[in-house]
């Protein structure tokens, strides 16, 4: 998990966040050991900005990943705490729900590490298997 958090930290260095100045990196760990990272990518039309977790899921699914999601790490160097936004929770579930996995989600800002299962972050969810 420490390694996965390091991957999220490294990803955060590539964050494109000129509007919020809030840099975020995410790293997804798959059952075969593959790690896919993402960063937030903001837009001059603010509402079009993408979160790091969503960017990572789009990258992974675009590379053919379907399920096997074991863990998600999120990091920001710009706040004490962070947790995935509601939209990202639902986007993560689309990937995790492909094979019914319930990934560990770990998140760290400059403060303490926090962890949950995705099912805790999104209870009674509406997912791909409904
Ligand atoms: N953001 C993420 O990328 N992930 C999160 O978990 C929370 C928020 C981004 C969206 C936006 O670019 C910036 O952080 C400020 O909200």
Image: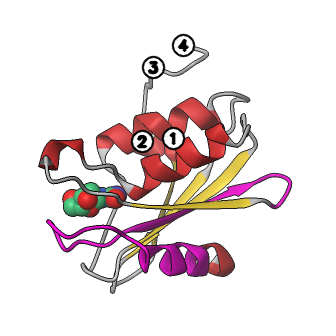
Residue occupying the far top of the picture: 130
Magenta region: which residues?
Answer: 5-33
Q: Quadrant of residue 130?
A: top right
Alpha carbon of mark 2 to alpha carbon of mark 1: how far? 5 Å
Identify residue for label 4. 130
CA separation in Å, label 2 and label 3:
11 Å
Assess whether mark 1 and mark 2 are in contact (beta carbons under 8 angstroms): yes
Q: Is mark 1 within 8 Å of ligand 1?
A: no
Left or right: 89, with 60 as reference point: left
Task: Tell which circle, 4 or 1, labels the residue nearer the N-terminal end.
Answer: 1
Q: Residue at 58% across / 81% down in the picture?
A: 6
Give the x, y percent position of residue 64.
73, 37
Q: Residue at x 33, y 86 (%)?
A: 110
Residue 89, numbered label: 2
Q: Quadrant of the N terminus?
A: bottom right
Q: Tell me the CA gap for discs 4 and 1.
A: 15 Å
> Is residue 122 shown to the viewer in this render?
no
Query: Reading the chain from its start, which is encountered first: label 3 or label 1?
Result: 1
Up-down relation of residue 72 to residue 7 (above or below) = above
Vertical side of 112 occupied by 117: above or below: above
What mark, if any, has residue 92 been given in the picture?
1
Image position of 6 with respect to 26: above or below? below
**CB of mark 4 within 8 Å of CB of mark 3?**
yes
Q: In the rendered structure, are the residues bearing label 4 and label 1 in contact, judged by CB atoms less than 8 Å apart?
A: no
Residue at label 3?
Answer: 126
Nearer to us of marks 4 and 1 is: 1
For disc 4, does the CB lie below 8 Å from ligand 1? no
Cβ(mark 3) to ligand 1 < 8 Å? no
């Amino acid at each position: 998990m420490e390694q996965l958090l390091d991957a999220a930290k490294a990803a955060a260095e590539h964050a494109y966040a000129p509007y919020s100045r809030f840099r975020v990196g995410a790293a997804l760990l798959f059952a075969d050991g593959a790690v896919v990272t993402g960063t937030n990518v903001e837009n001059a039309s603010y509402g079009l900005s993408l979160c790091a977790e969503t960017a990572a899921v789009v990258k992974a699914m675009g590379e053919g990943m379907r399920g096997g999601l074991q863990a998600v790490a999120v990091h920001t160097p710009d706040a004490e705490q962070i947790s995935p936004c509601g939209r990202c929770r639902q986007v993560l579930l689309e990937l995790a729900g492909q094979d019914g996995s319930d990934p560990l989600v770990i998140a760290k800002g400059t403060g303490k590490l926090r962890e949950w299962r995705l099912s805790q972050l999104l209870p009674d969810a509406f997912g791909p298997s409904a």
